[in-house]
Each structure stands twice: as structure tokens, then as C-alpha cells.
Image (spheres, helix red, strand yellow):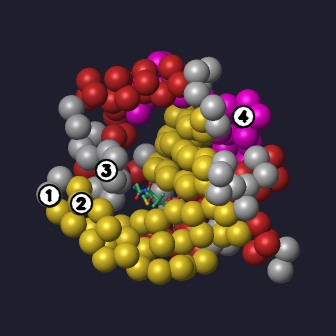
């Protein structure tokens, strides 16, 4: 399977990030409300986002099973979706975020549903998991609306910038879809 192939949903396109996306990505990641609930993206100086995107673009043709999509609305990058694959266990883990102006339109549910279908139908995976900070129930709602089931609660699972966060754990199995 090609790394990070183009996927489409009713309203959006998922494709590869490019260096041309740096200004947009920097603009929406400068919002504290976008970064607050992201484990790997604390609020950072703008030049670090350029380096982050450069590293992603370098992996597209170098890594195996590498899925890091730009989310585009009318060609403009409004967010990111990643899928990390573990072939041994036939499983994957997703993580995502959108620019604040794109929230509340059902976009992430549309995207996550598409990526789950891709992971089961085209990658042949068996289980897709995700978790979110307990302080971020909107993300849990996206997981639920996309067919994931709540599996548990991990106390102080993450430490971000010296603060512990409880995590709510979700997953969907291939067999869940046929019920
Ligand atoms: C979380 C995020 C991805 C949601 O994306 P989105 O496109 O706005 O999500 P959707 O519109 O598909 O669905 C959001 C759902 O959460 C609900 N919701 C919003 N705020 C909520 C809150 N404080 N508590 C509970 N539910 C909430 C919405 O009502 C909606 O559910 P509904 O359709 O049943 O009404 C987006 O807000 C985001 O990128 N946030 C910053 C980064 C982030 O948190 N990423 C996830 C890390 S795990």
C-alpha cells in the first residue's frame, strides 16, 4: 500500500502535507485552544512547526506504513490525521486535530470514519484505537460517533509539560462493523 494515499470524504480531501502548508499549519497551531489537548503538540515557536512538517514530508517515501494526512477543505489545509500501524498486532492508532474555525461541523467524524474504513478495508487491520485527555470530551464524542467503543480510563497516563492527564481509551474492531 502506498504511504498516505489520497482519501476523499463528502466534503473534504485527505492527502500529503507539503512545505507549502507551513504558513497555514503555523497559523492554526498558534492557537492555544488547538494545542491544549494535544499530547505531542504543546504550544511551540512557529519555526518548530516548519521543521515538524519537513520531517513528515521526508518520511512519505522513506518509511513503511506511514500515514500522515493533511485535511483539506477547498484545497486549504485545515487539519491533520495520523494513523500509526502495528503490523504484528494488525492494529492501528489514530490521532487528529483541526483548525479552530473548522470545529463543530462534523468534519472530524467524517474524516475518522473514512480513515477507519481505509484501515480495515485497504490495510487489512483488525483493531483501531485512540484515546483522549479526559478534559477533552468533544474528541470522545467524535470517537463514539465514528463507531468506536469506550474501553476504559487510564489515570495519569500522560505527562505533558509537567502536568499529568487522565486518558479515556476507545477502539473499534473489524468485527464491530458487521454487527
Ligand atoms: C476534537 C476535535 C477534533 C473535534 O472535531 P470536530 O470536527 O469539531 O468534531 P465533530 O463536529 O465531528 O463532533 C464534535 C462532537 O463533540 C461534541 N462536543 C463539542 N464540545 C463538547 C464538549 N465540551 N463536551 C462534550 N461534547 C462536546 C459536539 O456537540 C459534537 O457532537 P454531536 O454531533 O453529537 O453534537 C476538534 O475540536 C479539535 O481538533 N480540537 C483540538 C485538537 C484535539 O483536541 N484533538 C484531539 C486530541 S485526542
- The residue tagged 1 is 162
Residues at discs 1 and 2 in contact (Cβ within 8 Å): yes
Q: Are marks 1 and 4 in contact (CB under 8 Å)?
A: no
Q: Which residue is mark 2?
A: 159
Q: Is residue 131 above or below residue 117?
A: below
Tell me: is circle 3 under 8 Å from ligand 1: yes
At 55% across and 55% down in the image, what residue appears?
93
Drawn side of residue 170 relative to residue 163, left or right: right
- Residue pointed to by mark 4: 6
Instruction: Kindly identify the residue that appears in the image at 35 percent across and 23 percent down.
Output: 50
Which residue lies under the disc numbered 3? 35
Q: Could you tell me which secondary element the residue under label 2 belongs to?
A: strand
Which residue corresponds to the image point at 33% horizontal and 40% vertical from the top-left?
29
Q: Earlier in the sequence, mark 3 or mark 2?
A: 3
Among all residues in the image, which is located at the extreme right? 178
Which one is closest to the eye, mark 1 or mark 4?
1
N-terminal of the pair, mark 2 or mark 4, is 4
Q: CA distance from mark 2 to mark 4?
A: 34 Å
SS under mark 1: loop
Number of marks drawn = 4
**Stretch of the chain drawn in magenta:** 1-25
Q: CA distance from mark 1 to mark 4?
A: 37 Å
Is residue 135 visible in the rendered structure shown here?
no
Amino acid at each position: 500500500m502506498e504511504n498516505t494515499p489520497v482519501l476523499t470524504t463528502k466534503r473534504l480531501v485527505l492527502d500529503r502535507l507539503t512545505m507549502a502548508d507551513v504558513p497555514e499549519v503555523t497559523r492554526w497551531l498558534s492557537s492555544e485552544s488547538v494545542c491544549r489537548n494535544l499530547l505531542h503538540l504543546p504550544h511551540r515557536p512557529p519555526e518548530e512547526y516548519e521543521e515538524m512538517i519537513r520531517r513528515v514530508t521526508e518520511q512519505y517515501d522513506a518509511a513503511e506504513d506511514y500515514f500522515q494526512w493533511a485535511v483539506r477543505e477547498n484545497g486549504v489545509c485545515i487539519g491533520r490525521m495520523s494513523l500509526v500501524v502495528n503490523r504484528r498486532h494488525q492494529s492501528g492508532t489514530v490521532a487528529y486535530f483541526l483548525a479552530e474555525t473548522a470545529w463543530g461541523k462534523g468534519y472530524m467524524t467524517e474524516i475518522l470514519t473514512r480513515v477507519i474504513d481505509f484501515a480495515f478495508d485497504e490495510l487489512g487491520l483488525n483493531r483501531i484505537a485512540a484515546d483522549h485527555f479526559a478534559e477533552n470530551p468533544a474528541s470522545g464524542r467524535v470517537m463514539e460517533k465514528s463507531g468506536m467503543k469506550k474501553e476504559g480510563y487510564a489515570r495519569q497516563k500522560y505527562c505533558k509539560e509537567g502536568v499529568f492527564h487522565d486518558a479515556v481509551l476507545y477502539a473499534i474492531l473489524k468485527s464491530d462493523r458487521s454487527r
